Amino acid sequence: MKSMSASGGAATPSGAATPSTWRGLAMGRSGGDLAIATLLGLGALATLLFGEAYWLLASQVAITMIFALSVDLLVGYAGIVTLGHAVFFGLGAYTVGIASAHLGWTEPLSGLLLAGLVAAALGGATGVLVLRTKGLGQLMLTMAFASLVYEIANRAKPLTGGADGLQGMVIAPILGLFEFDIFGLTAFLYTLAVLGVVVGLAVLMTRSPYGRSLVGIRENRVRMQAIGTNVQQRLLSIYVVSAALAGIAGALLAQTSQFVGLNVLHFSLSGEILIIVALGGAGRLWGALLGAVVFTLFKDRLSALDPAYWYFWLGLLLAVIVLFAPKGLIGLVDRLLSILQRGEVR
Amino acid sequence: MITAALTILFHGLAFAMVLYIVSVGLGITMGLMNFANLAHGAFAAAGGYVVVMATRSLGLPFWVALPAAFIVVALAGAVIERLVVRTLYGADELRQVLFSIALLFMAIAGFTVAFGPLQQQPEIPAGLSGQLALGDVEFPSYRAFVIVAGVAILAALWLLIGRTRMGMRIRAAVDNRNMAEAIGVDTKLLFTLTFALGTGIAGLGGGIGADILSITPTYGQEYLVLFLIVVAVGGLGSIFGPFLAALCIGVVDVAGKYLIPEFGAFFIYGVVIAILLAKPAGLFGVRS
């Protein structure tokens, strides 16, 4: 104990510089980001090496992480609350699904791009309208648009397969080399690679002046307007980016499962992804990523037992988080780390 | 032709009244406390279950079961408001939305465990189970009762909000909460009473409307979009706005499904998007 305090005391002045260098590279203001990033990286590595049975689940987790990131950028950073983001996820899934099943477009990477573009186009079109309103009206519009598209997908049976789902999808090997295998190794590595790119982009974006201006708008819209920010344009642009990322996540789900069901457009998915972001910690990229992992793993375990129990525990967990830990899991990690650090210095 | 129009109008009206009875309380609480309560439908479902249990298991008459639903659900609403909802007034929208979703999920799980996943029907009194002939067109008389009940609740609310001291306080607090507090309105008590009233009416609506919006554990999630639409289109803090909105939506939906079934629920969402874009605060909104 004594030696620890001595070394801790000596390390503090020089040690203080190290985390800030890290922060400069990729992380936010707290140590929680770094801890979670390390943990997630180790988890992915362990799954790759030892968790053969979990590769398929792991690709699901990675897809949920991308979706959660897209929602966190919108809700956590820019402060636009949406109850209909599944519309972009589902549109991305149906885009690659329909392109493959009806048009023979089976190349996966260009499929992702196509899905992102289509989702971005819908994001632009609805974003212009959604962002004209605020508060409850905004929630309602996002919900109404999502319900409308759900209805369309449900009715357009020849194109989407309706309630039976879209079957007959074929996805070509990635880069012409890696075929999707039954163990899900290709799916896992593929989704992981896309996740890596998306996280990289999101980190850069949130640390850029553009990302900071979004936080500024969330915190004080009027002041940002007063200092010359084109608020409406910024919000629309993040709406489009978020839609595109959600579309890519949906496309990944369609490609790795080679099936698209109506549930990708359902309201409950829009609700779930919002829960994931809040669970992890809204407004923190690594929070959303952590939330996606915890949520998907819990759901996999608990809903296998009984859906009613799953709903109960999910509700209880969410209520506890909202009432007692509004900063989410990442807030708890931060607090834990700061307690540990204080203990060490003393 | 006229028969079809009458049928559409009748069933549209009945549907509209159920929507109104369930949603009106949500609009008042949202307008007064600024609390986005997505669990509102779960209170309506709870009322539905009270009526089902009272008429089926306890063998109580329907006319006793309905007030019981109001009282039980209003009490539950008051307790939940006192314990938790209160701490979230003034919190940001995301937290309110998430908390009420949490409440909704727990209610769904609770209903499933207690009553099973299947649909439940309350027992309707013999006097209302027949048909009502209007010229050469026949209507189910229960639905006529639903229409009457909807209008009666509108009238009762109008008297309560427009003519009583409590209603005056509610209106004052919706318009300007700080000012109302400054002149001595006990808003804490007022909020609890209003939340209880709003959820109680929803419980009543769940019981009365079980014939049209069937009582299942996921009731609060399935019809949530409809309830929110009525409130958003009608405007927060108003009792007439949601009435007109429910009329619009009920009749348009029934007409759409009857005349062009392949388009399903398109019409509702189309109308809603159009109205919200033209008037973001709703038809009669005090505030957006």
Image (spheres, rainbow, N blue to C red):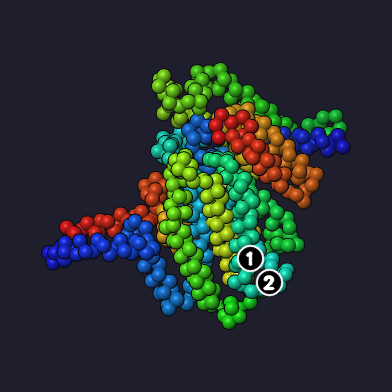
Circle 2 Cα neighbour tier, 10 Å, few/some/many (<14 / 14–19 / ≥20):
some
Residue at image point 58% right, 51% down: A84
Tell me which corner region of the image, top left, top right, bottom left or bottom right, holds residue B6: top right
Q: Quadrant of the C terminus of chain B?
A: top right
Residue picked out by circle 1? A114
- Measuring from the top left, give residue B98's x and y in whole percent: 48, 47
Indicate which disc, 1 or 2, sits on the residue closer to the N terminus: 2
> Farthest residue in the front direction?
A228
> Farthest residue in the left direction?
A2
Chain identity of mark 1? A
Q: Which mark is residue A65?
A: none
- The answer to whether any part of residue A149 appears in the image is yes
Seen in the picture, residue B196 relative to A235 is either above or below; the reply is: above
Q: Amino acid at mark 1?
A: Leu
CA distance for labels 1 and 2: 10 Å
Residue picked out by circle 2? A105
- Measuring from the top left, give residue B42's x and y in whole percent: 54, 42
Residue at image point 57% right, 67% down: A252
- Measuring from the top left, give residue A288's x and y in whole percent: 45, 58
Q: Quadrant of the N terminus of chain B?
A: top right
**Depth check, front residue: A220 or A43:** A220
Q: Are marks 1 and 2 in contact (CB under 8 Å)?
A: yes
**Depth check, front residue: A314 or B55:** A314
